[in-house]
Amino acid sequence: MKNKLLAKRYAKALISNLDESEYEDVLNDIKLLFQIFKVNVNLIDTIDSTIYPLKKRIALSSLITENLNKSKIWKNLFTLLVNKKRFFIIFELFTEIEYFILDEQNKVKVNLKIAHKQSKDTLQEISKTIKNIIQKEIILNIQISPEIIGGFVAKTQTLAIDGSVKNNLVKLMNITKI
Amino acid sequence: MKIQPDEISSILKTKINDFKFEIDVSETGKVVQVGDGIARIYGLDNVMAGEMISFPSGVIGMALNLEEDNIGCIIFGETHKIQEGDIAKRTEKILQVPVGDKMLGRVVNALGHPIDGKGDIEADENFAVERKALGIIQRQPVIEPLQTGLKSIDSMIPIGRGQRELIIGDRQTGKTAIAIDTIINQKGSDVNCVYVAIGQKKSSVAKIVKTLEEHDAMEYTTIVAATASESASLQYIAPYTGCSIGEYFRDKGEHSLIIYDDLSKHAVAYRELSLLLRRPPGREAYPGDVFYLHSRLLERASKLNDDLGGGSLTALPIIETQADDITAYIPTNVISITDGQIYLGSRLFNSGIRPAINAGLSVSRVGGNAQIKAMKSVVGKLRLNLAQYNELKAFAKFGSDLDKTTQDQLRRGERLVEILKQDQYSPLPVAKQIFIIFMANEGFLDEVEIENVLKVEEELFNTLDTEYKEFMESMVKDKINDEMKEAMREICKKVMKKF
């Protein structure tokens, strides 16, 4: 979890060097980089491993950035991380950069839990409720979790909205204690 | 009172009918690091300083450090129940504790939860733990006395209601004894007491509870205990909790007395938290705001003006010194904050003078105005006589021949020291205190052997109790005039005839 704090600092620095027009390119790059590192599970360990010479590790990280939209920025960032032996925070860094950019665009990623599969209309109704609370454009990531019994639970990085039947039943139980 | 099953079902029905399905919205963060009673939380960007934070296991914390990308939070409870990655929620409430009349007679922890096994407390209100000290307009000068029942204090270092009087001394010099005696002496008066035990052994707290119960003093006393086995966070918050409980009575227009036993351990607990929160250490590794830690606490003691009910909160903080050094960091801080100090010397204690009050180093800066007129007119040169005696005593040790005046002064001093001795848990009514001091000052005891002084005192009190009850009551009402003094002399002569 400490990585998150570290990643936030790097993300802040990166964002301050970006122009608003570059945000979309960076977001697309992040999507691609996420895939690359998820598919090649050992890549992060290899780049971060001091067993291999520093120059080779920097070269390897630069290779990854070659075909990206903002290859120069990524190359510099990766080189810095390799030099500082902090390449292991890369996933947290992507998440933080994404969060910052979406925040700048008044958007937010929301993990939405619902008990059962819902119709399009119901989902729209839920997203409207969430949007009203958060006051931002939302990007939904839907999960089915029967343990919430009904209703929904929405979570962003800084907010939890609990409209589940489970939560209300717990509250009812506490109220009816005599 | 028995509740019928029908009533229960109707209550339940109403509650279920009134229940509304709600959506809970709360700001959340994630626990980045946890341990040693401290948690670092990522997120919670809008959290307030001092705000309560709830963790999934039901543990409560308080935000203390608001940093750029994380917050430092102290945890009140079991740290091991919180794990890295746990969700921490904002409560949007500043830490509060229950207060009310039902707190009296109870032993509670630093969060105001009962720990005496006597069941839940139905609180009248909840008060924030950290409350701002009242302003100048809301206050009035200290004008009413708070009797401790101890001759040496009530005569030489009088304490007024709303005053902050420090009790300072080495370990085992009777600091707690003075505080407990003061609580016991409030029996039958209109003063409610709060005793805050910080970093003490559980057995010591249990002993205090037992003593107070034996003297029927628990009826008007609340004990807030944050013992040595509890976390530094709870020890840090305990005096503020006790203060809020005391303030409830003050704000109602009543009088209350709070004892912080002791603030040295409180400062140590705060130093521990500050170092764990990575705040920069200063002198003796205490953080920079250790003065503010105690000043904001002790400033809450006050005497309210009549428009606000005229209630008062008197504070008796205790500080433990090391090797009689009152010039250490925390002692000097608290001495400068309070309105005087009662200094207890270990040498005096070991030489059998108990309470071991050093009259030269003890002072009450505002209590003089609150001292009752009768006592004021009798005390006169008691302090001066004692100081002269102590000075001459040193010379007398050289063994040279002494003139009569010096010998008289020494004789008087010895007897004054003797009458100021007092057993533990035996506070005296102010009238009796006045009488015995008058007797010594007038020289009635000069011819009595030292070992018989206590016997004379006992006889005097017996005589007063049996024959002069009304006279005693009238005596304390106003200044003692010449007529009264003559009557007192007659009583003294009557007692002295028996010896």
Image (cartoon, rainbow, N blue to C red):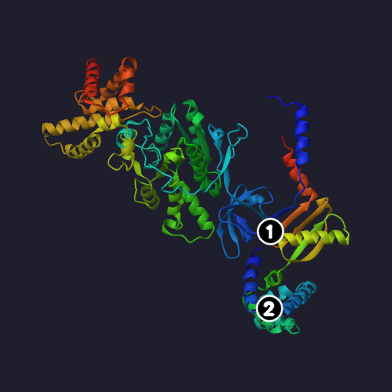
Q: Amino acid at mark 2?
A: Glu
Please identify the quarter of the rendering in which residue A2 is found. Answer: bottom right
For the C terminus of chain B, which image quadrant? top left
Q: Return the mark for residue B85.
A: 1
Relative to B132, B58 lies left or right: right
> What element does badge 2 sit on?
helix
Residue A75 appearing in the image: yes
For the point 50% across and 45% down, the residue is: B240
Relative to B9, B58 lies left or right: left
A63 is higher (above) or lower (below) than B167: below
Measured Cα–Cα span from mark 1 to mark 2: 32 Å
Which of the chains bears the disc numbered 2? Answer: A
Residue B201 appearing in the image: no
- A130 or B447, which lies in front? A130
Instruction: Return the residue at label 2.
Output: A20
Residue A11 drawn at (x, y percent)? 65, 73
